[in-house]
Image: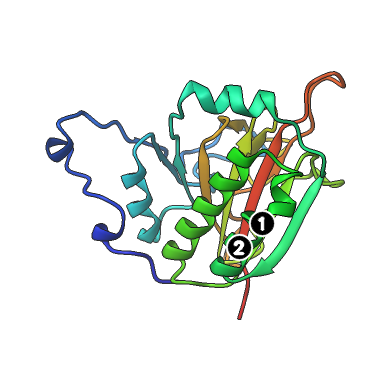
Amino acid sequence: MPFPDESAIMSRDPHQRRTATLFVESWPAPAPDSPEMPPLAYPAPHVIACSNASVLLDLHRGDIDMVVWGRIVPDVWHKALAAHGSSRTVFDMCGTCGELVDALTSRMLTKEFPPLILGDAAELSSLFSAVTKDCPQRLRLATTPPDDVAFEAASGALRLICCYGAACAEWCSYPDPRAGMTSTLDSFSVAFIKGSGGQHAGCLHRICRPGHDNTPAGIHLIIDTVAG
């Protein structure tokens, strides 16, 4: 799958922005010495994360399984999300980026989801389209986790996940979730997860259920590539 060149996002040269930029990268490492996970046989996902959007340039790397853009949003985003509830539990649509943006900005949908979330979902759909060279998408916005919250790999070539508010996503460091460690995606962070392509288990992940019944429902966004 082709990915945009450097000019499509921004320069990774921190001197051009007069700021220091920290990139955090994980490498698959030997597992603990145990019969279940023998040494030097640890197919952990390779993940790179940064708060700067230029981290998306690493999507072209063949050794990367997931890229996390840990964006920092203004406080007004958190306040706006808390002030506007959702009257609809799920929005699920396949189409081109233009079709999805039209639906997300329609007057009918703005009455059912917070406008902030709809606007952000439209922006992320456009970004996803740029990364995948206008590949058709399946976009889902939901206030409740799927019925099946088991860990899974991305179904297509690429998946985008973003959680808002109390919504939560996790990924696992081992093909068997019972044996590996899990990490949590921060609210408003954007994860781009590559599909396994049938070569290995890929980066296993899931949308989680709230820890307590009285936890306010959050909203999660999932965008998948759709084969044309």
**Label 2, residues with CA under 10 Å away: few <14, some 14-19, many ≥20:** few
Residue 194 x %, y %: 53, 58
Instruction: Tell me the amino acid under the disc marked 1.
Output: Ser
The residue that mark 2 highlights is 102
Q: Which mark is residue 35?
A: none
Task: Please give the label number shown on residue 106.
Answer: 1
- Residue 170: give x, y in percent of width and height: 64, 36
Residue in the picture at 43% in, 53% down: 64
Question: Quadrant of the image for the C terminus?
Answer: bottom right
The residue at 38%/65% (across/down) is: 3
Q: Secondary structure at mark 1?
A: loop
In contact (CB < 8 Å): disc 1 and disc 2: yes
Q: Nearer the viewer, residue 151 or 1?
A: 1
What amino acid is at disc 2?
A: Asp
Front residue (pair 107, 1): 107
Residue 182 place in picture, x, y as percent = 63, 32
Front-most of residues 193 and 79: 79
